[in-house]
Image (tube, helix red, strand yellow):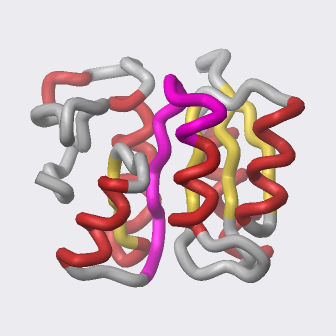
Amino acid sequence: MLKHKCILVVDDDDAIREMLRWRFELAGFGVLEASNGSEAVKAAQTTKPDLVVLDLMMPVMNGLQAARVLKLMKPEVPLVMFTSEGGSDLEQEASESGISAFVPKCGGTDRLLASADCLLGLGDTAHCGPPVGGRNPDPAGAMA
C-alpha cells in the first residue's frame, strides 16, 4: 500500500540506511537518504520530507545538532531519533532539540515503523500514546 509520504533517513552507517530504506519502502513510503546531519539539512532544503529519522552519532553534524536546525527550518516535520545510544539525559536533550519520538535501535524497525505511522497519522493510531512535550505522540511512551 502506497502511503504517499516521504521519509528522510539519516545515518552514517550504509547498512542501516539500506535496511531502513527497504523496510520503509516495503511499508509504502518514499525514502530519501543522508549520511550525516549536514546532508540531512541540505536535503530538507531542497525536498519536502514528511518525517525525518536521525541517528545520534554521526560525523560532520550529529543528530541532535541536525534536529535543532531542522526544527527551525521545518517545524511541522516530526523528527525521530533512532539510535543505539540511550539514557534519560539523552532523551531529555533530544526532546528539547525537537525530537518527537526516541526509538532505540535495539527496539528494532517494527517499533520505528509504528512510530512513523503514529507521527504521520497513518494506520491504527489508537496505540500511539499521549503527546510528548506538546508535540506528536510517541507510540511507546519512551520520552514521557
Left or right of 8? Residue 111 is left
Residue 33 visible in the picture: yes
Q: Is residue 78 magenta?
A: yes
> 92 or 52: which is nearer to us?
92
Q: Is residue 116 magenta?
A: no
What residue lies at 40% left-to-right and 50% top-to-bottom? Answer: 99
Quarter the N terminus occupies: top right
Quadrant hosting residue 47: top right
Residue 29 visible in the picture: no
Residue 62 vertical placement versus 69 (above, below): below
Residue 59 vertical placement versus 118 (above, below): below
Quadrant hosting residue 124: top left
Residue interval drawn in magenta: 71-84
What residue lies at 15% left-to-right and 23% top-to-bottom? Answer: 126
* Residue 71 % position (x, y): 54, 40
- Please give the count of numbered marks on the rendered protein: 0
Residue 23 vertical placement versus 120 (above, below): below
* Residue 132 % position (x, y): 20, 41
What residue lies at 43% left-to-right and 81% top-to-bottom? Answer: 84
* Residue 8 % position (x, y): 69, 44
Left or right of 90? Residue 78 is right
What residue lies at 83% left-to-right and 43% top-to-bottom? Answer: 43
Residue 34 vertical placement versus 138 (above, below): below
